[in-house]
Image (cartoon, rainbow, N blue to C red):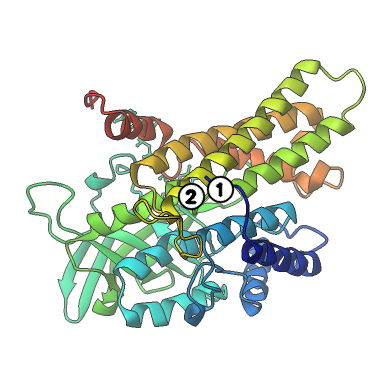
Amino acid sequence: MDLQFTAAEEEFRAEARIWLAGHVPTTPLPSLETAEGFAAHREWEHQLAADRWSVVSWPEKYGGRGASLWQWLLFEEEYYRAGAPGRVSQNGISLLAPTLFEHGTEEQRARVLGPMARGEVIWAQAWSEPEAGSDLASLRSAAVRTDGGWLLSGQKTWSSRAAFADRAFGLFRSDPDTARPHQGLTYLMFPLDAPGVTVRPIGRLDGKPAFAELFLDEVFVPDADVIGEPGQGWRIAMSTTGKERGLTLRSPGRFTAAAERLAALWHEAPEGTAPALGDRVADALIGARAYQLFTYAHASRLTADEGAAPDRAQPKTGDLGAESSLNKVFWSELDLALHETALDLLGPYGMLADDADEAPAHGSWAEGYTFSLAGPIYAGTNEIQRHIIAERLLGLPKGRR
Ligand SMILES: Cc1cc2nc3c(=O)[nH]c(=O)nc-3n(C[C@H](O)[C@H](O)[C@H](O)COP(=O)(O)OP(=O)(O)OC[C@H]3O[C@@H](n4cnc5c(N)ncnc54)[C@H](O)[C@@H]3O)c2cc1C
């Protein structure tokens, strides 16, 4: 692994740093889990897109910069170091877009990607159902053939951002008579304001409507909104989950920046603060650095071309296969450790919500903590990731189901 960045990579980093220094809002935006915050974050996506910083790794014709995996990693480091706002377009950019690049039609890419990059259309992921989470293949929401398209019916749940989003992408059972549950599923996109859609927000621990349940009653979707072949939804979705757990959902920049903020908190801690907390700060710093180096190793491997010298300019986005499960378990546990340690350092003040005037760092540690609690659950629970690691990476026998 070569840890020297090229001149072009350093130039890219410097350009991003300068842009961010001139544009990141000096007062943090309101939480994106509220209507006001959602609108403010949508506007921020628009600003990013105006200078082609919203989707740096996409090809230029879709609003990106054709950035390599390395440039993307450096951009993310700069983004989080600058304290830039959370990405309200994350579902679309890191899940739907890679799916469209791989399985969509040119017409779909031309229609969907630009408005996504500019924050004009914000996407929600509608995969989970009340009885289909870890065992996603047991999903029951149906897509029934009709003239020129499909009628969607059923219930989806835990759909992040859906309370305020514009459209959703999800899996539906289009053939109920297949031999195996993974067969007969179709991947579709649908509007959240279409006739037949009811969006019911679900309050989070802090009361903010971060997610929603979706009730669908014969919602019409044209054939143009089917991604890939009908019946092939499982295969298409699985090529997306590796991206969700792997690099593109949680770049190390997010954690190295949080670790640096945590170290700053430790330096400001009053005299007499328990030394054991200092040890936890050090552990979290080491964890963030280890994750960064582990990701660099992945990136080196992903950009190496079958034994040839790594082609660092390749605009790959990081498809790790089963190894993405290692990343998922690591980043979710690291995020918890970072936030728990920060709250223990801050004491009672750390519990203040982001709208309280005295909340340290505008409540970002408290809000980050409630979100980090969900890390071991979303993007596939850590128990399931450990099964994948045991079976597919370590070759251990299948566990009892
Ligand atoms: C913050 C957050 C955001 C989310 N966003 C979205 C979203 O945008 N779109 C979406 O579609 N979904 C979303 N989800 C849903 C998420 O994907 C599911 O919660 C997750 O897949 C687990 O499913 P479940 O909740 O049904 O739990 P279950 O599958 O019922 O699991 C319950 C517990 O049992 C364990 N378990 C289950 N099966 C096994 C097994 N075979 N072996 C060992 N242990 C097992 C699980 O690991 C877990 O600890 C989100 C969830 C959260 C918390």
Q: Is residue 276 visible?
A: yes
Q: Nearer the viewer, residue 68 or 5?
A: 5
**In which of the image's four quarters is ligand 1 placed?**
top left
Q: x, y percentage for residue 327?
A: 47, 40
The residue lying furthest to the right in this view is 271
**Relative vertical location of residue 194 with respect to residue 335 in this rendering, above or below:** below
- Determine whether, in the image, residue 217 is placed left or right of residue 213: left
- Which residue sits at x=75%, y=36%? 262
Q: Are marks 1 and 2 in contact (CB under 8 Å)?
A: yes
Q: In 3D space, how far apart are the residues under numbered discs 1 and 2 (Cα atoms)? A: 8 Å
Q: x, y percentage for residue 309?
A: 44, 55
Q: Nearer the viewer, residue 197 or 392?
A: 392
> The C terminus appears in which quarter of the rendering?
top left
Specify the quadrant of the image occupied by residue 106: bottom left
Q: Nearer the viewer, residue 339 or 351?
A: 339
Q: Which mark is residue 219?
A: none
- Which residue sits at x=28%, y=74%? 220
Q: Which residue is mark 1?
A: 2
**Could you tell me the amino acid type at mark 1?**
Asp
Specify the quadrant of the image occupied by residue 73: bottom right
Q: Residues within 10 Å of mark 2 (few under 14, many from 20)?
A: many
Q: Residues within 10 Å of mark 1 (few under 14, many from 20)?
A: few
**Relative vertical location of residue 104 with respect to residue 240 in this rendering, above or below:** below
**Could you tell me the amino acid type at mark 2?**
Ser
- Which residue sits at x=56%, y=74%? 65
Q: x, y percentage for residue 196?
A: 34, 69
Q: Which residue is mark 2?
A: 300
Mark 2 or mark 1, which is nearer the start of the sequence? 1
- Determine whether, in the image, residue 142 is placed left or right of residue 156: left
Q: Is residue 359 visible?
A: no
